[in-house]
Image (cartoon, rainbow, N blue to C red):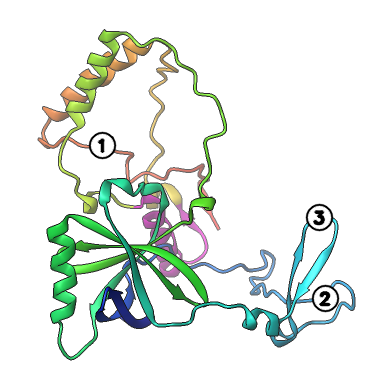
Amino acid sequence: MRAIWSGEVSFGLVSVPVKLYSATQSHDVSLHQVHDADGGRIRYQRRCEVCEKKIDFKNIDRAYDDGESTVVITKDEMEELPADESKEIAVEQFVPEEQIDTLVLDKAYFLEPAGKSAKSYVLLRRTLEDAERVAVVKFTLRSRTRLAALRVRDDVIILQTMRWADEMRDADFDIPQPKVSKKELEMAASLVESYSQDFEPERFTDEYQEQLQELIDEKLEHGEEIDTEATFGEPEEDEGQGNVVDLMEALKKSVDDRRKKSSGGSGKSGGSKSGSSKSGGSKQKKAS
């Protein structure tokens, strides 16, 4: 892992030297665009629509358009903005974790102790654990002021950036309020109970990315033309049950199906399987 930022967490007169690491990574297969006729790589160029010349990045400024007029913001003007470039993660508040809506949470980072002694790091970690609170902090990363939360995961302090209040949107639509019967609620509760178990993240995989990688591997090994049915299996047959209009019938059938699966050979209960050995999209006999 490579640290992307270093500085210190400060609360009161206590300073905690830390290094910042990305806590997540994308597992998406990296693809680029090519010309379908000859396979040539597609390249993008920055061209001015006035002079039609290719423009170097050093000659590009920013602009704001409000719909009626445009103002250009130069690099010098951007650099003069009073962005805080300090290497400080400043604690603003300690708040109950349940008061932070998960909707505001964004990217997560690991904080590693960076000083000669980890005592202040352990002090902060123990303080967060004992108080059962989350530290709301402000800091600057890549010239942008960020709001974030500090919490503990295992023995590591996690920093998770948060969206600002004015970035959050309200659900600007009406929610119908049809009457739900007691029996329907009981059946729904029974269905929830049949799915209830501890969360195991490793059980869930991105089947699209797995099949994309399998397709790439097959093409690398066998060439451009492959048999998609041999690679991914035949598409699953539609059981032809159509849409279930009656909510009560749908609940009853869901509970019954769940009980059958739970009492089957695997002995496991969990989310519905989508058939990872099957290709989810439309397929042709041959793919090129």
Element on which disc 3 rests? loop
Most foreground residue, 233 or 64: 64
Sequence-first tag of 2 and 3:
2
Q: Quadrant of the C terminus?
A: bottom right
Sequence-first tag of 1 and 3:
3
* Residue for point 48% across, 66% down: 223
Q: Judge whether residue 209 is colored magenta.
A: yes
Q: Judge whether residue 207 is colored magenta.
A: yes
Q: Which residue is identified by label 3?
A: 67
Most foreground residue, 27 or 73: 73
Where on the picture, by quarter, is residue 258? Answer: top left
Task: Tell me the CA gap for discs 2 and 3.
Answer: 20 Å
Magenta segment range? 206-227
Q: Which residue is identified by label 2?
A: 48
* Tag 1: amino acid: Gly
Lateral position of residue 170 relative to residue 90, left or right: right
* Residue for point 35% across, 74% down: 89
Sequence-first tag of 2 and 1:
2
* Tag 2: amino acid: Cys
Where on the picture, by quarter, is residue 249? Answer: top left
The vertical placement of 80 against 150, above or below, is below
